[in-house]
Amino acid sequence: MLNSVERDLRKTYRSEEGWSLERISGMDDAPLYTLTRRCPGTVERVLVNVRIAAAVGTAEFGRLGEMAARCAEKGMPASRALLVVPQNVTLSADPGNIDLFYLPSYSVRGGEVIWSKSTLWKPDGRSVFEET
């Protein structure tokens, strides 16, 4: 799954435009990735977290906001926070100042997260195994 996330982020935030994608590991409760772009006199930083679930709510948005606040306290302010989610995800809260990045390779159908190219689902969202 993370290969898909990295691939799609790199397509949108291209290195030709100065973006650098870096995975953060070994830190508890830290964003999964940072996107950075150095411009003359400034550094643009985007915190990226991934939530592959059928629904995303207040807890996830609050958690990412707290991560952004902690990074700012450590001298690494972020210009934006980005949450990677599957297509058709249900939002049970207002994301506020957090941007959503819809992952084209995953989708929510019938309350489940599936690979969007799956042939096991009918266009109306029902499984091919369901009886009609």
Image (cartoon, rainbow, N blue to C red):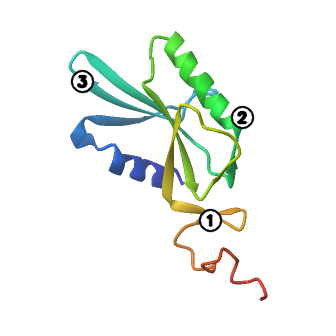
Expressed as whole percent of the image width and height from the top left, the position of residue 82 reads 50, 37
Q: Indicate which disc, 2 or 1, sits on the residue closer to the N terminus.
A: 2
The correct choice, above or below, for 75 with respect to 30 in the image is above
The residue that appears at 67% across and 36% down in the rendered structure is 60
Q: How crowded is mark 2: few (under 14 residues within 10 Å), some or many (20 or more)?
A: few
User: What numbered label is drawn on residue 39?
Assistant: 3
Q: Indicate which disc, 3 or 1, sits on the residue closer to the N terminus.
A: 3
The residue that appears at 59% across and 59% down in the rendered structure is 88
Badge 3 amino acid:
Cys
The correct choice, above or below, for 67 with respect to 124 in the image is above
Badge 1 amino acid:
Ile
- Residue lying at the far bottom in this picture: please name it: 132
What is the CA distance from the residue labelled 2 to the residue labelled 1?
Answer: 23 Å
Position of the C terminus by quadrant:
bottom right
User: What numbered label is drawn on residue 114?
Assistant: 1
The residue that appears at 45% across and 23% down in the rendered structure is 78
Expressed as whole percent of the image width and height from the top left, the position of residue 86 reads 57, 55
The correct choice, above or below, for 63 with respect to 108 in the image is above
User: What numbered label is drawn on residue 59?
Assistant: 2
Q: Considering the numbered disc 2 on the image, is that residue within a helix, a strand or a loop?
A: helix
